[in-house]
Image: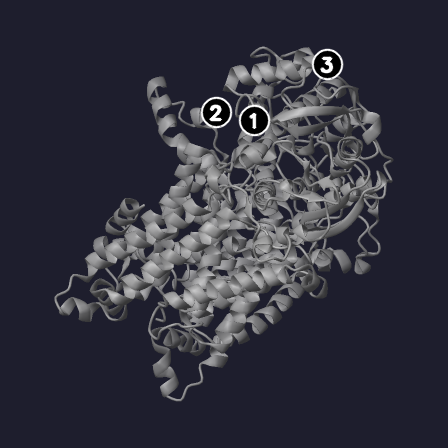
Amino acid sequence: MLLIGLAMERGLIRHFYKRTHAEQILVTFGLAIVIQEIIKANFGANPIPTSAPDIVAGSANIGTFLGLGDAIVYPWWRLIYLTFSLMILGGVFAFLQFTTFGMVVRAGMHDRDMVNLLGINVERRFTIVFGLAAVVAGLAGVMYAPILPPDYHIGMDFLVLSFVVVVVGGMGSLGGAVAAGFLLGILQSFASMNEIKSLFPGIDQIIIYLVAVVILLVRPRGLMGRKGVMED
Amino acid sequence: MKQPKINRRDVLKGGAALGLAGAAPMFFTRNAYAASYLNDPGNAATVTLGFNVPQTGAYADEGADELRAYELAVQHINGEGDGGMLNTMQPSALKGNGILGKKVEYVTGDTQTKSDAARASAKRMIEKDGAVMITGGSSSGVAIAVQGLCQEAGVIFMAGLTHSNDTTGKDKRRNGFRHFFNGYMSGQALGPVLEKAYGKERNAYHLTADYTWGWTQEASIKASTENIGWKTNNTVKTPVGAGDFSQYITPVLNSGADTLILNHYGKDMINSLTQAVQFGLRDKNVNGNDFVIVVPLYSRLMAQGAGENVKGIFGSTNWHWSLPDEGSQAFVKSFGQAYGFPPSQAAHTCYVQALLYADACERAGTFMPCEVVGALEGHKFDGMGNGPTEYRAEDHQCFKDVLVVKGKENPSSQFDVLEVVEVTPRAQVEYAPDNEFFAGGDLGPCNNGSA
Amino acid sequence: MNIMKSEIGMMVVFTIVILTMPLWLAPIGAGYPDLLQKFAIFGLFAIGYNILFGLTGYLSFGHAAFLGIGSYAAVWSFKLLTMNVLPAILFGVVCSGIFAFCIGYVSLRRSGIYFSILTLAFAQMSYNLAYSVLTPITNGETGLQLTINDPRILDAAVTSATGLPSTTLFGLSMSGYSGFYFCAVVLIIGFFIALRISRSPFGLVLKGIKSNQTRMKYTGFNTRPYMITAFVISGMYAGLAGSLMAVTDPLAGAERMQWTASGEVVLMTILGGAGTLVGPVLGAGLIKYFENIFSAFNDKSLHELFSFLPEILENGVVAIIRPFVGEGWHLMLGLLFMLIIIFLPGGVMKGIDRIKTKFGSKSEKPAEQSE
């Protein structure tokens, strides 16, 4: 993943930092289609069943553990997934916030030319960040496979949603993205409850977008967006 | 009807007047002279069929299998290969020299599992390639959309995989025919098997894909399970392509239900089943009953995608390659020789549809749609894998045996994931044309199209 | 070269090129009514989109919603009123205009990517609702189709004995070539209006917004009404395109509103050249051509295509091309996107301009053409 991400950045994306956002999106989208089709040609279009290691198969009876009978049951794998993603999040956050490397990247995001003028090779750091982003996304995919058997089209299914989450969270803010992810996810589950659905039919189909609209109207840059990122 | 009407010839004249007719393309002139129906092959040595299957999107593998079956069918109709079901089909007017002496050619297209794209693709086959018949598809939305198009254009549509009641119910068309079974039949076939396996005292919870097919399926299954005494605990609609079904599965745990019925297909079914198993539903015991899951519509490709999780789970299917009858075996044999693995039910229904169409043309002595419709309506045949079958004239639905299957406990290969539990006889799944699940439609008159 | 500069000259050339499409597209296999209709309709869609995106730089990611609304409105007009296409088109344009006003009014409170996400959110909501709970109005997954028993109160005379009636323009059937010519005429009119808009004071304001909205605001200029007008106009173009889709093929499906459909028009506009007048039409044609023609190849047709080559060469060529066509046409499309974006920044029209400036003796400023 790191290698693929690095290669992508070096070969393609780097030439696009100076282009418009629309073109950046388009060229990566084109690349996504190409990769997706190559996967399809090799693995077919059918989902590939992937089971979690046997040791963590089955589900945890949290209810009994808390003395509530067997009211709350949750699969082990999802608990592991949750822990794991929290760890990754913490790692990425610490990396960007507490290391010099992270500081330079954040500065470069704000004003690339200025950082370059200071004699720091910001391009190389961006390459590494891009590679890391690919690694994180790849890990998320690997860990998710037992829950959602992967097929060649799985990226597209997540594309729009992750886009919405990032923007609602606010561009350039890791905390915002996490908060938006949690908020939208919880509201989605809430809207899927039968009681809510009978009150507003179809609410679970649109809740995410509805909340996104409301948040963006109330908070111009999403939950924790920074000024000046992706606004030109 | 003295209305101003511009036909293709007028347009052609206009084009010539512009002095640009030098490049007048072939199809302007191909059928310019008094043909009695659209895309009449006339004296041509070949006839063109259009195979419209999903090549991209979630059903691309099913589409690829359908296309393999069609290519095989064309070979067999043209007298190449080992003949497959041509040898077992009863009665058969096919001679192995094409249709009515014309060699069969075909064109292909991608439905993308979208109504618009499917119609655009079908239109290309009709308008540009001169196809006399369109067939294929792997979802009901597309089947109904393309069936409507073929009716308007005036060609025959032989539906591929489509399971919604509406295809031969509310949205039936005179020019359209469906060999595949439907949601109501699934319910009728599953009912008695479920009763035998799980008893009369069950409390069922439905998760249903929130669109037309899901609803008709849910209604059909609900009716037939309530018939055997089951209670329906709840019916919950889930958005198509939800991906994560956990928020729909957790309420099942505390609902008091002991049976989960997944009215999902394709990826939705794979995901919801996988996740339901992960939530430990099948390890539970409610009201003294072991918790069970039922998937009313199965396909082998889906079962492969869900892997281990399908073991022991009941469902229904149109056909399975392990059937021992002569027709099925002949088809499995030639398909296996050509491609190296057994065909799916989608491949089977498409193969049969192509043969049935060819046979009907042969019997009608023409490709004219209305004559072919006449030859197919009420046609009785056998030897094609599902026992004695009839294309009912009233709604163009095939009536035949339905298979109840179960996920195999010890599969011997990656294709061997389902075992046939029962072949439900045709009589048990038959219904009156005005059955409440199918009411409201009208075949209308047949359409030959304007040449 | 001056011919392209004058409006009349441009219109004449455009008109001739569009109306003779059946002739010059036939040799490359695209000269059949349905694809020609699609060219015209999506060209119109892209022209309208370009009024928003090309002139103001606001990237809407939900324009397909208006396309869908136009289609549904038109089909309902066929079902309830009459098979005549004019009321259907009018109804479609008005409905999508109203929707565009509501969505634009809200979305235009934000700019940049936040605007894009707002439009995306509205379009996805429309799509999800149309697909499921609004089925009584939209017929959900299956798509809204005509039935024999529709009321059609203005066409009482037409009996149902002949099956489904077809859409007409005062008796002229709207399928096949007549449908194409109708769409083509609408496209030409739409092109003319877009030309006028982009060269009008209103168009200048929009371009001013694109280059620096803040400065416009500081000069005391209220840009908001102009933005909303541009949004509504481009929404109405989309509605027009949607109703034309229903005119040539009376069916309206929810997937017309999905984000992939919105993305498609963005691709068309950018590939062709955002901000140019002809570019979006070109981009629309390019994508629709790929979708319809390249997906249709299979082993057999490829072998026929290259049968003029010696057999070994033929097999080799077919083996190389095969992965890119038929079920692999998406691969081709993805590669095409990348190639155009990488090597022709600004789209095909900008690329043509650059070639012109390089080789043309009477080279013009490249900016001249890119309106």
Q: Are marks 1 and 2 in contact (CB under 8 Å)?
A: yes
Q: Are marks 1 and 3 in contact (CB under 8 Å)?
A: no
Viewer-closest of C172 and C286 = C286
Viewer-closest of C240 and C221 = C221
Report the residue that reaches farthest toward the front: A67
Q: For mark 3, does the 10 Å Cα neighbourhood hold few (<14), some (14 to 19), or many (20 or more) residues?
A: some
Viewer-closest of C321 and B102 = C321
Question: What type is the residue that disc 1 sits on?
Answer: Tyr
Query: Relative to residue A176, is residue B128 depicted above or below?
Result: above
Q: For mark 2, does the 10 Å Cα neighbourhood hold few (<14), some (14 to 19), or many (20 or more) residues?
A: few
Dividing the picture into quadrants, the one containing residue C56 is bottom left
Q: For mark 1, does the 10 Å Cα neighbourhood hold few (<14), some (14 to 19), or many (20 or more) residues?
A: many
Left or right of C120 on screen, residue B4: right
| Residue under pointer 2 | C300
Write down the chain letter for disc 3.
B
| Residue under pointer 1 | B106
Regarding residue C85, the answer to whether it shows in the image is no
Name the spot of residue B450 as percent of width and height, x first.
70, 37
Q: Quadrant of the C terminus of chain A?
A: bottom left
Q: Quadrant of the N terminus of chain A?
A: top left
Name the spot of residue B12 as percent of width and height, x first.
57, 41
Write down the chain letter for disc 2.
C
Asked if labels 1 and 2 share a chain, the reply is no
